Image (spheres, rainbow, N blue to C red):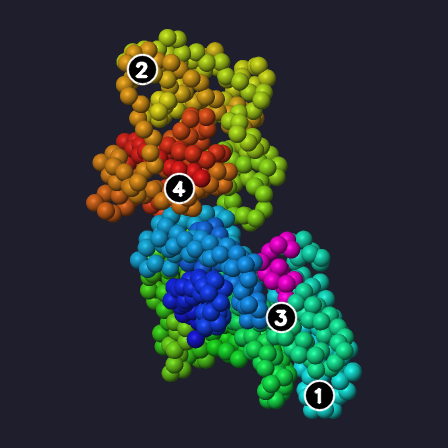
Amino acid sequence: MDSVALGRMMGGLHPILVHFPLVLWPLALVLDAVGVVRKDERCAWTARLLMLVGTLFALPAFLAGIFAEMFAARAGTPNEPMELHEFAAIATTWIFIALTATRLFVRPARAYLTVGALAVGLLIYTGYLGGEVVYSYGASVKNVTAWAAPTPEDLWILKTQQPLQGILYSDWMHNIFGGVVLAVAFLLLMAGSGRAPLMALQWVVPILFIGGGGFLWIFSDWDSWPLSDILPITDKEVLLHKVIATLLIIFGLAMMKRKAEIHIRVAYQNRVMAVLAIIGGALLLTHIHSVAPYSNVAVGVYLHHCVLGLLALGIGFLKLYETHVPAARWAVPSMMALLGLVLLTYNEGLPWYLGNVRHPRPGPNQGLVAQIGQRRGELVFENGVLEVRFWKLHEDTPAPLRATAASAVVRAGGRSTLLPLTPVDVGEEGIAHFRAAAPFLEASTVFETHLRVEHDGRGSEVEFEPWVAEVPGMRNPALPAPAYACPMHPHAGGSAPGACPQCGMALIKDRGDRMHDDNASLIFAAGTPRAGNPTTLTFQPRVDGNAVDLEIVHERPMHVIVVRGDLSHFKHVHPVLEENGALRLRHTFPTGGTYYVYADFTPRGAGTQVFRETVDVAGPAGPAAALRPTETDAVLAGGMEVAMHVMPRAPRAKDEAMLSFVALRNGEPVNDLRPFLGARGHLIAICEDGAHFAHAHVLDGPGKALRFEIKPPHAGLYKVWVQFADGAGKVVTAPFVLRVH
């Protein structure tokens, strides 16, 4: 079984295991409260047992949840809601680990029950977030069609892998620390055999713990403080390393504390070591590898730390009984020696005892690499052709195999496809190169490949890392947004002025809530409009008070959006440029009332400017339409269904959101849409008070979905109109109402 198959299997256990702590932890706290009130020892004993059992189930549930998150992300589930659920789960688990360790040695008190009640509230919130990930985003739900592509930020996370420098550093750090643990185990074995003076151990062992803790505190992470500032000290992985290092230092200091009688000191040290080992072991089972959370190497990292955590837990529980059970005195150093051996042979991949090797070389063609038996498989996808080559593990030399059949199962957009592979360059020693035409994958921004090869009388399977396309705007979501951005494609930008790589428009500096520059202005005239009568609207753009030439943007010098104050009326129209530089538009307002007129234009040499003008139209206005969020996935427009998918499903103010639309006829996607104003689609978004406006063009890329990215400046309701042309060239306008949080 390869690492990915093992990870998928463990991820499937998460919904099973997670129910145990959800029930056992709150029940334990209720029984403890009853025991305190009634002074009932049976309630107290049962509560302590339930708290311990709940924690023992919570740790593998947490580990399984990490694997479930990894593969849900590969299937297209947005990263942000999963990260929020993960963060809440980490906080909840760590608090209950502390409560469990406390409850093993002390009676419940008011402070304990108060913290426990708060922890139960956090547990409920964590469960709610987990339900949102499944029911709102379809995480790990089969047969969910994810036709909405992941955002550029989510693609960046999937594509990011731990650099070789970080991998080698992590190996080095774990291996050195394994040597320290082996030294401690050896000294404890000597003490147990009576061959080492107790007074010598009294100083050497504590110094090893303090020195090892100090080493771990400083050198645990090459990309974090104090060695670097790539990762903050508050990063989950970094913080866990610092906590474990602190526990080691505390234990070393506790061992050095003098006591009047030797047996008192030994009992004291045993209890301190037991508590710290149990806490440290439990924390290791919640280890999150933040550098590459969705790469295949993470499966091995989690399994390594799971083994380390179980060994530490075993040491902790054995230490509790060391003074009462003679055999425990030998079992503790023996288990510590095993812990040191695992650390000494640690590698950032699937553990060696599961058949893996240390870090196969990168592929010579810069493709995706996975170990398959004693070979490297390299996958390359280019120009609609998927190719797989086999190389020796540590050499860039072909490694043919006597294959009788080869195929690949590719997963993209919620569907899986069987792809037979054709041999290339068949030689006497076998086949080292396969390929298959896969033009349908060119429409995918991310897909997974599961390779199956029948060779030498047996079958081999391996799953590669996700293949991720180069999408404009892919960037680390933890970094600040670029200072200059494209008004039509907010993800595309940079630190200096320039042109959008996707549409060529000039990048504009972030204006905050403002829609235009301070030195830009617009002279606007609307006369005295009346409902039902044509009215002439005049626009005269100015920069520094002077008339300017306008860029032709998507076939027009100016785009004008006319909406009624309640957003019930919408028109996307274009004024005519006259010789004197003014632009005029004849427009008929259907009813009386207040209207907003948005003028969208780009002066030559400057960025896009948007001005909102208010027009009061005489005549009967009729009742105002209520603005409510669209409750359905699709609306009828132009004789077809238009479905919308939003990622994240609950978009937030000042964050990018991906809006995807698919036109359906008789339930099937329409594939004969025509360009409209130089693009496959346009999107207008206006907030409920009319103060904020966004005009976006469709993101490039093949496929039947129209994808737009917007960045709402404020929370509230936004009305969204998507426009495209059908096969006959008729413009279709589909309205939706979206809530931004």
Which residue appears at 58% of the width and 46% of the height? 479
In this rendering, the answer to whether 702 lies above or below 301 is above
Q: Which residue is mark 2?
A: 592
Query: Circle 3 — which element?
Result: helix
Distance between mark 3 and mark 2 Cα atoms: 74 Å
First in residue order: circle 3 vs circle 2? 3
Q: Are marks 3 and 4 in contact (CB under 8 Å)?
A: no
Q: Which residue is mark 3?
A: 276
First in residue order: circle 1 vs circle 3? 1
Q: Which residue is mark 1?
A: 190
* Relative horizontal placement of residue 203, taking residue 221 as reference (left or right): right
* Relative horizontal placement of residue 229, taking residue 414 as reference (left or right): right
First in residue order: circle 2 vs circle 1? 1
3 vs 2, front mark:
3
**Residue range (magenta):** 232-244
Q: Position of residue 228 (x, y in %)?
A: 69, 56
Distance between mark 1 and mark 4 Cα atoms: 67 Å
Q: Quadrant of the N terminus?
A: bottom left
Q: Which residue is mark 4?
A: 659
The local crowd at label 4, few if under 14, some if 14 to 19, many if 20 or more residues have their Cα within 10 Å, is: many
Which amino acid, by three-letter code, is at mark 3? Leu
* Relative horizontal placement of residue 259, taking residue 74 as reference (left or right): right
